[in-house]
Structure formats: C-alpha cells, structure tokens
C-alpha cells in the first residue's frame, strides 16, 4: 500500500515564461564603424593577398555557449530513430564546419556508435575539440580526426603511423574517414568504457591529461570544457542522441499528451458527493484534484482512451482504503506502472516516451512562493532550455516550470509512467 501524500493545494498563478534577451550588437557595430573601417580594409587586403598566393586560412573554431556538467550516460541511446539521428548529426556537422570532410557521415557515426555502445554525440564532440571536425592541417591529413598519437606501449601497434600520429588511409593512400570513425568507436569501447572509464572526466584523464609531457602549451586543460560545450550544442538540436547535462536541456517531446483541467465543469459538478469523498478538505477537483487530473492525462496518453479525473480519483480512493484520494503513482490503474525516479533520470524517461508527473512540494519561499501551498502536480512532456514543458491542470497546456531545483525551496519529486 503506497503511503498517501497530502495534496490539498491552492490554485497556482501561471509560471512566468523565460524572458527573451534582446541583443544590442547591431547598434554597437554601427556606432563603432568609423573607427573599425581602416582595420576592416586591412583585414580584407590580407585575405585577398593570401588567396592570391595560394595560402589557406584556417576556419575559426565553432563557438557554443551551452556549457554545463555532463550528467547523463555516454552509451548509445535505446530505441531511437537511427535515420533521424544520422540526419540531425549531419546537419550539426554541416553548420558547425561547412568544409568538414565528416559532412554526410552521420550514418557512419550512428552505426559505429551502436556497434560499440558509444553515443555518436560523444565521438563528434571529440572531433570538434581535437581537429575542428577534421579540418586541421595535422593528423586529419590521415583521417585521424580524433588526434590519437602513437605511444611506446601502443595498445594497437598494427595501425599505421607517421611516427607520431595514427594514419587511416585507403588503398589509394587517401584519408579513410569511414574506417577512422569505426576505429574511434572501437577504441573508446576497448580502452575506456570496458576499463570503467565511461564519464567525460575519466576519459580526459587518459585521453587528454592535463600536464602531459607532450602538451607544453597546456592545451589539454581546455579539452573537457570544449567537449562539454559541443555535447550540449548537439543535444539541443538532436534529442534522439542527446546526452543529459546539469542544464537538463534535452528530451523527446510528448506533445500528444492530452490536456485536462482540474477546474473543468465536467467533474466540478455542484453538490457532487464523490468530490467531497475524494477530497474531504477542498471538496472539489478544482481545489485538490491536480494529482487525479495529472494521472488522467497520463492514463489517456498511455491507453489511447479518454480517462477522466473521476476515474483516477476513484482508483486512488480504493488504494487508500477508501479514506480519501491522495496521488498514488502505483494506483493509476489500467496496468500502468508508476515509479518515483531521481531528477537525473527525467531526460532518460522522457526520451523513452514515458510521461512524468512532477510534484512541487509546499513552499516557504523561492520563485513560486505563495503558489501550490499544499503541493501541486503537473505532467512533464518535454524540456526546452531551462524549463520543463508541462500540462498544468490548474494552469495551461505547455506551462513552463524552471528546471532549477533552487526555485522550489520545498523540494520536488518525479514519477515516470509506462504500460
């Protein structure tokens, strides 16, 4: 028998949407134009001279702002649309480095990653950090886009080298990008993941250690940050191969979860005795039916049938020895499984298309002070930026709630559902 959870709550005010920051850079540039013009002319002149002389100006490194600690697993995601993942990764590579020789190789990354249980997002992010996606003038000449050097105790001595870098060439001595991608995935599996080095920080300690004797300029110190930024950038646009971070910015949208309001007149019937039976304090779904209404939304989505809050409230009522109808995740009915999960698993469950009910605990302060005084339940469908996208039974469809735990001084809880 699940322990009943108190759920008498006040009706909440709508959560504020994150304000959009307006950029002033066009104004700054126009204001600075008179002073910048001579410099711009000089830069253009140099570029033309280099082009005439046949020189090659290296592209600037791609810049990504989404930096945060990586918290999710780096293994290959389950039950994904591999074709969609490959197409999305191709789009990222083309945008990040238009001249990258890895363009069009999204399918290779997905297939190699799947065969070795490595997330292709990790492999591509390492390619960004090590070689600008294969556009440098060093080891990428040999398709060594991941910058592996040969060592005295090389674990793969059969791979051809130039004395320093490993070489991946085809029969015509041209860069073998397909072979390099497959080797990279196998290398990570055999010499990192199989050895228990399956987090970004543990990979760096061996792959790109700070203070290494062959790194006199200390470039390795930026490796972790650079790879993290790329992982987050890819995860924002390619949710099927996303890797969870502390920003919690990526999921697969469950937009088809139907919206139900706890204030709907269909179950807020005047003198409805069952409402008082289910919620003896509030005596209405409007006042205390957020848990039952959230459960009804989840049940309707999973069963593909219309399930009302009256049905789920009755199920909770029966589970609680007919005392009242507290939210009970294991008692939604219809053979639906409900389990409490930690915050770190929210993205994983959403990517598996398992809707989540979030409980916002009673507050004494923070961003939602005065709202949901007795606790409140909403259905999480997705995560966009730094917000949960929810169906809020006392608010709106696509209501936003912050993913920052500090905003909820009373705490929160998460329950994932599947059938």
Image (cartoon, rainbow, N blue to C red):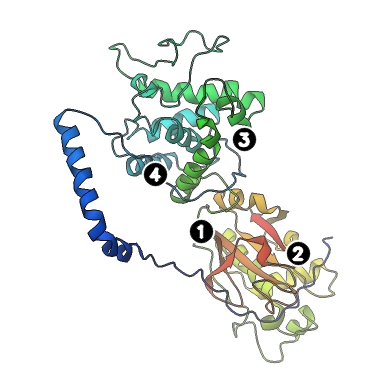
Contact (Cβ within 8 Å) of mark 2 with mark 1: no
Q: Is residue 348 above or below residue 93?
A: below
The residue that label 3 is drawn on is 201
- Disc 1 crowd rating (10 Å Cα; few below 14, some 14-19, many 20+) is some
Where on the picture, by quarter, is residue 60? top left
**Which residue is painted at 62% across and 73% down in the image?**
308
- Disc 2 crowd rating (10 Å Cα; few below 14, some 14-19, many 20+) is many
Distance, label 3 to label 2, CA atoms, is: 39 Å
Distance, label 4 to label 1, CA atoms, is: 18 Å
The residue that label 4 is drawn on is 88
Whichever of callouts 2 and 1 sits on the residue coming sooner in the sequence is 2
Say the numbered circle drawn on residue 328: 2
**Which residue is painted at 63% across and 68% down in the image?**
378
Contact (Cβ within 8 Å) of mark 4 with mark 2: no
In the rendered structure, the answer to whether residue 195 lies left or right of residue 351 reads right
Where residue 208 sits in the image (x, y, percent)? 55, 27
The residue that label 1 is drawn on is 385
Whichever of callouts 4 and 2 sits on the residue coming sooner in the sequence is 4
- Disc 3 crowd rating (10 Å Cα; few below 14, some 14-19, many 20+) is some
């Amino acid at each position: 028998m699940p322990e009943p959870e108190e759920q008498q709550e006040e009706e909440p005010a709508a959560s504020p949407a994150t304000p959009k920051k307006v950029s002033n850079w066009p104004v700054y540039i126009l204001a600075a134009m008179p002073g910048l013009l001579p410099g711009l002319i000089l830069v253009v002149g140099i570029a033309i001279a280099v082009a005439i002389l046949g020189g090659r100006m290296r592209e600037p490194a791609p810049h990504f702002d989404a930096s945060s600690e990586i918290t999710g697993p780096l293994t290959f995601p389950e039950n994904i649309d591999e074709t969609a993942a490959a197409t999305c990764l191709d789009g990222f590579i083309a945008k990040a480095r238009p001249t990258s020789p890895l363009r069009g190789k999204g399918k290779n990354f997905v297939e190699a990653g799947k065969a070795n249980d490595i997330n292709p997002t990790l492999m591509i992010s390492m390619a960004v950090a090590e070689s600008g996606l294969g556009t440098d003038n060093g080891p990428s000449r040999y398709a060594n886009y991941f910058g592996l050097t040969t060592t005295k105790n090389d674990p793969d001595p059969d791979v051809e080298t130039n004395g320093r870098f490993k070489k991946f060439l085809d029969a015509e001595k041209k860069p073998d990008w397909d072979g390099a991608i497959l080797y990279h995935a196998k290398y990570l599996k055999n010499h990192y993941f199989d050895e228990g080095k399956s987090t970004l920080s543990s990979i760096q300690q061996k792959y790109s250690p700070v203070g290494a004797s062959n790194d006199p300029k200390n470039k390795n110190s930026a490796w972790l940050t650079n790879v993290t930024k790329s992982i987050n950038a890819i995860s924002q646009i390619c949710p099927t191969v996303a890797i969870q971070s502390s920003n919690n910015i990526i999921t697969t949208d469950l937009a088809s979860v139907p919206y139900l309001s706890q204030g709907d007149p269909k179950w807020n019937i005047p003198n409805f005795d069952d409402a008082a039976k289910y919620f003896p304090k509030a005596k209405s779904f409007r006042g205390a039916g957020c848990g039952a209404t959230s459960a009804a939304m989840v049940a309707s989505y999973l069963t593909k049938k219309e399930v009302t809050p009256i049905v789920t409230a009755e199920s909770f009522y029966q589970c609680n020895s007919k005392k009242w109808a507290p939210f009970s995740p294991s008692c939604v009915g219809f053979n639906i499984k409900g389990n409490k999960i930690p915050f770190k698993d929210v993205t994983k469950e959403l990517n598996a298309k398992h809707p989540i009910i979030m409980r916002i605990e009673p507050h004494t302060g923070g961003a939602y002070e005065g709202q949901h005084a007795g606790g409140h339940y909403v259905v999480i469908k997705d995560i966009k930026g730094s917000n949960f996208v929810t169906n809020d039974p006392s608010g709106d469809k696509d209501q936003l709630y912050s993913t920052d735990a500090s905003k909820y001084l009373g705490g929160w809880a998460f329950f994932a559902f599947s059938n």
